[in-house]
Amino acid sequence: MGADPQGKRKARGRGRPARGAVLVACGALLASACAGMPDSGDVEAVKASNAGDSQVRVYAVAPRDNADPEEIVDGFLEAMTSDDPGFATARKYLTKRAAQSWKPEQSITVLTNAPHRGQADRPGDPDNEGRTFPLTGRRIAQVDVRHAYRPEVPSAFDMGIHVVQQPVGDGKTKEWRIDSLPPGLVLGEADFLRNYRAVNKYYFASDENWVVADPVYIRQRQDPVTRMDPVTQTVKALLEGPTKWLGPAVDSRFPSGTELARDVRSLAPDDQSKLRIPLNGKADRVSGVVCRGMAAQLLFTLGDLTSVRVEQVEILGSGGTSLCLLTKGQAEQEYSPVREPGRGENPYFVDDGRRLMTLEAGGRQPDKPAGVPGPFGKGAVQLGPVAVNRTEDRAAAVLDNGHELRVGSLTSDEELPEAVVTSVAPRLEDRLSAPSWDGRGDLWVADRNPVKPRLWLVPGGQGERVEVGTPWLRDGTRIESLRVSADGVRIALLVTRDDRTTLQIGRVGRSVVDGREEITVKDLQDAAPRLESVTAVSWAGPSRLVVVGTEAGGVQQVRYVQTDGSTSATSVLPGLNGVTSVAAPYADQSAPVVADSGNDGIVRLVPGANWQPVAKGGELPVYPG
């Protein structure tokens, strides 16, 4: 499809002159229509795509001769949303110097909508009548050079694009071009989600043998700058190392300086679903154990790409020789943070008799709840919030008065031991939070006593409690609830500050000082800044959470968010009123989400269905963890 040789365009969108890109959709259902597209007539610019529509492509259009300044700015803004190799067409809207210095790969500023171009101020430079056009919008996130998405509380974006007249051709003719612009890319959320997709990189928890998810964003199709396909982009991002936030808590098995072999732009598995990955000489001398760890990182990372199926990875050295081979099954058995990954997960809840009950997760219709073995299933004590460990042989419960946290067996009727943590707060709501187990088998709980709030860890659920360092837990800050990830490296916290409860993700740090392990939670980041308040949270995978919250002026929602704070319009679950707590499976995505819906008791949501009642008198649902 070519541009009109006379550069004729119709004004579209935003009430401004014609925009410099053509947007084409050609999915499977539209193939016949696209095949019959007209090959003549004016080129019409089309408004940016719907969020997440990966079937839509934007093709940049070069500036026409004698284009006015408004057309130049609008054309450039649209060209930024395209897949144009090297952003070559977008650079045609820039002066030579600006085209050389502009680095679109350095950062992405994400706005709620496409940036709004205002009217130019008065001419700025008397010599060439340069003009500055304001760009405004609501900024919601930044993506850095390591592809890490960092959400922000929506705030005003207000920058400018400056255009000047630049000699072209024989030097006697001048054309308007941009000589000053915001750094990187500036995209509306819809265009960002159309062009980029989330993928989890995986690194090893420091000094451990299991992996931790590190979410980043890569291009949906070929990257305009590197010319790499999505598989190669993903491998490159993994080799570059973890994001800045997660970096202090994880390690990579790849030696420093490891890169893909020169000129590798495309990677694809063979007909046996084996992917061969050629590396440079930095990987040539690694041991077999280290190489298997490298292959495991690759297998877990590539598992998030639904466009390809990779069942085994073979790593090749600089000479093309095979260094090691690992299968997906081996990686899951040896390096997953979840014991026996892939087995079914069953939810638990507390019934109206204050006993611990369990449900079979499978099936389109909920089975009748069953009591668990051991003291928590017999009604010997009155249960409050509970947590079941990852191996499902022990549970921890805050007793109904909120003063004591006790740990008991789920396999035998042994006597219930003494409390492992206690609280002396006068009010029930200021005592112990719901507990949570990490993948190491350690137990976490918060004492919400306003006189001295603390976060506690109980090693193995039965050792001497350890106070966790929380330098941010002061000046009226309060932990409402917590959930620790299976890998033990991240913790989801509902934190109240200034009468607002937000979802914060903290990084767990461990160090040995004078022979004693010290544990801290630091560098909290807001994982749901667009929610005015959050009332419940549960892990729903390696980098995904299910939350209950409300937007400003909105109604309560149950929705998925990523740990990096990114989300999409498709992440909202079917409506449900009065939700006070929620639980989701970590590994078995076919298992239902379970919630406490107040008057309706325990309900569940099977993928592809609607909420179903389970137990009228139940509350406080949890999955292992």
Image: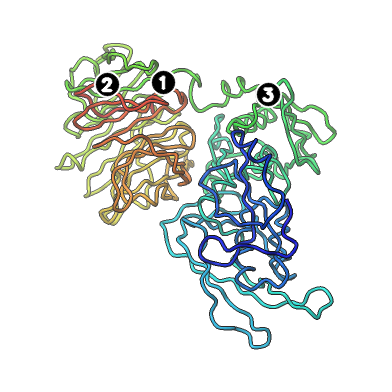
Q: Which mark is residue 312?
A: 3
Picture residue at 52% right of the left edge, 42% below the top: 249
User: Which label was assigned to residue 345?
Assistant: 1
Residue 377 occupies which quadrant of the picture? top left
Camera-near label (1 vs 2) is: 2
- Separation (CA) of disc 1 from disc 3: 26 Å
- Relative to the observer, which residue lies in front, 204 or 66? 66
Badge 3 crowding class, 10 Å Cα cut-off, few under 14, some 14 to 19, many 20 or more, is: many
User: Does the image show residue 462?
Assistant: no
Q: Which residue is mark 2?
A: 614
Which corner quadrant of the image does residue 336 belong to? top right
Determine the secondary structure under disc 2.
strand
Q: Earlier in the sequence, mark 1 or mark 2?
A: 1
Q: What's the amino acid at mark 1?
A: Glu
Number of numbered discs visible in the structure rendering? 3
Front residue of 593/449: it is 593
**As shown in the figure, which amino acid type bears the numbered disc 2?**
Val
Residue 610 image offset from top left, x and y in percent: 34, 27
Q: Quadrant of residue 21?
A: bottom right
Question: How is this picture coloured?
Answer: rainbow
The residues tagged by marks 1 and 2 sit, at their Cα atoms, a distance apart of 17 Å
